[in-house]
Amino acid sequence: MAKPAVRIFRTYWRLYGGFSALFGSPYLYVGLALTGLLAPFWLEVDEKGGRLWAQTAIDTVPSMLGFSMGGMAIMLAFSNASIFGAITQKGSPTSYFVTVVANFYHFILVQTLAILSALACMAYPNDFTSAVGFFVFSYAILVGIATAGQLLGTAQIFNASASLPVSKEPQPDSDER
């Protein structure tokens, strides 16, 4: 069971771009900056000593997960044969299609890590778990912007393919019955 999961993760990591893509992402650094700027928020504690931001993450990230799944479904639902042929690039293992799917996987992975980080902060409320968890939460929100950009790029491909001539199969004459 573990081998397929490892293989899927390796495929995702390669298509995503690995550490160079992760550390080359402006969203990662904006997430770090937000973590610093919003320290009063993630340092705030409730009357029981818990971190208040963690519940915000638990309340918001599942909706983002729904967006991720919905965006992926929309991309697949609107694909016709010519569009699908264009984005799969004749089955290329690094086609636009599998790269977009890998980016959605990244978004879903980061969102899942954000939920887990918030839960860890709720279980172990201290400055370290709060800072790390809030950073992951911030990054998850920002990666949503990148994912929306991928949907825009995909929409542009769909739009451009609408101007391509559609090959029509000869239809039987409707008068010949």
Image (spheres, rainbow, N blue to C red):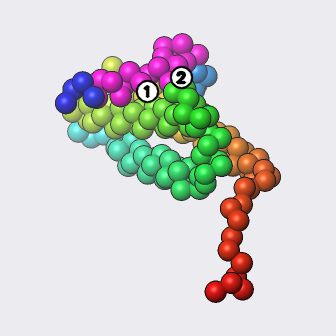
> Residue under circle 2?
28
Mark carried by residue 12: 1
Q: Main secondary structure of the magenta part?
A: helix
Q: Residue at x 38, y 21 (%)?
A: 10
Residue 103 placement (x, y as % from top left) = 51, 33
Q: Secondary structure at mark 1?
A: helix
Q: Residue at x 31, y 40 (%)?
A: 46
Q: Residue at x 61, y 54 (%)?
A: 80
In this orientation, which residue lies closer to the viewer: 34 or 18? 18
Residue 155 placement (x, y as % from top left) = 68, 48
Say what amino acid the circle numbered 2 marks.
Leu
Above or below, comparing residue 94 to residue 70 in the picture = above
Q: Is residue 157 left or right of residue 146?
A: right
User: Which quarter of the image is occupied by the N terminus?
Assistant: top left
Mark carried by residue 76: none
Magenta highlight on residue 7: yes
Residue 114 placement (x, y as % from top left) = 38, 34
Question: Dot 2, crowdedness within 10 Å: few (<14), some or many (≥20)?
Answer: some
Q: Rounded to the nearest whole Å, what is the CA distance between mark 2 and mark 1?
A: 18 Å
* Label 2 close to label 1 by CB (< 8 Å): no
Above or below, comparing residue 94 to residue 150 in the picture = above
Q: Residue at x 50, y 37 (%)?
A: 101
Closer to the N terminus: mark 2 or mark 1?
1
Magenta highlight on residue 175: no
Q: Is residue 96 left or right of residue 44?
A: right
In this orientation, which residue lies closer to the viewer: 100 or 124? 100
Above or below, comparing residue 105 to residue 159 in the picture = above
In this orientation, which residue lies closer to the viewer: 103 or 23? 103
Say what amino acid the circle numbered 1 marks.
Tyr
User: Which quarter of the image is occupied by the C terminus?
Assistant: bottom right
Q: Is residue 98 left or right of residue 158?
A: left
Magenta segment range? 5-24
